[in-house]
Amino acid sequence: MAQATTNTDLYPKEPVLSRFAAWIFAGMMKIAENNPRLRRARALQALSDAQLAELGLTRETIAHHVFRDVYYT
């Protein structure tokens, strides 16, 4: 009795250029997410409105506060 086995690649590989671009993009995202200013903005977003008011901030002014010396003069 003869048996035939067909091996199929269930997860075909992406083209090399696509994998390289995805690798570059993932690295850039990691750098951006580890930015101390972005972490500060996320920490402020996690506070309640009352806690923000104690700091003299509103949700609308968080970005202005965090990036004040870079973008807003």
Image: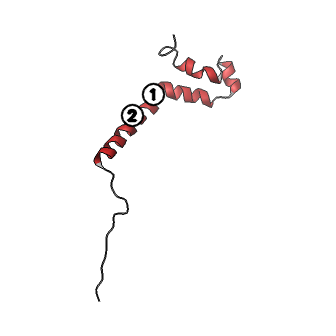
Write down the residue under mark 1. 35
* Type of colouring: secondary structure
Viewport quadrant of the N terminus: bottom left
- Image vertical order of residue 59 relative to residue 21, above or below: above
Whole-percent x and y of residue 70? Answer: 47, 16
Whole-percent x and y of residue 38? Answer: 50, 27
Write down the residue under mark 2. 28
The residue type indicated by label 1 comes to Asn
Q: Is residue 64 left or right of residue 15?
A: right
**For this rendering, which residue is in front, 49 or 24?**
24
Residue at the (57%, 29%) spot, across then down: 43
Whole-percent x and y of residue 9? Answer: 34, 63
- Image vertical order of residue 1 relative to residue 35, above or below: below
Give how far apart the Cα atoms at labels 1 and 2 are. 11 Å
Whole-percent x and y of residue 37? Answer: 49, 24
The kind of secondary structure element at disc 1 is loop
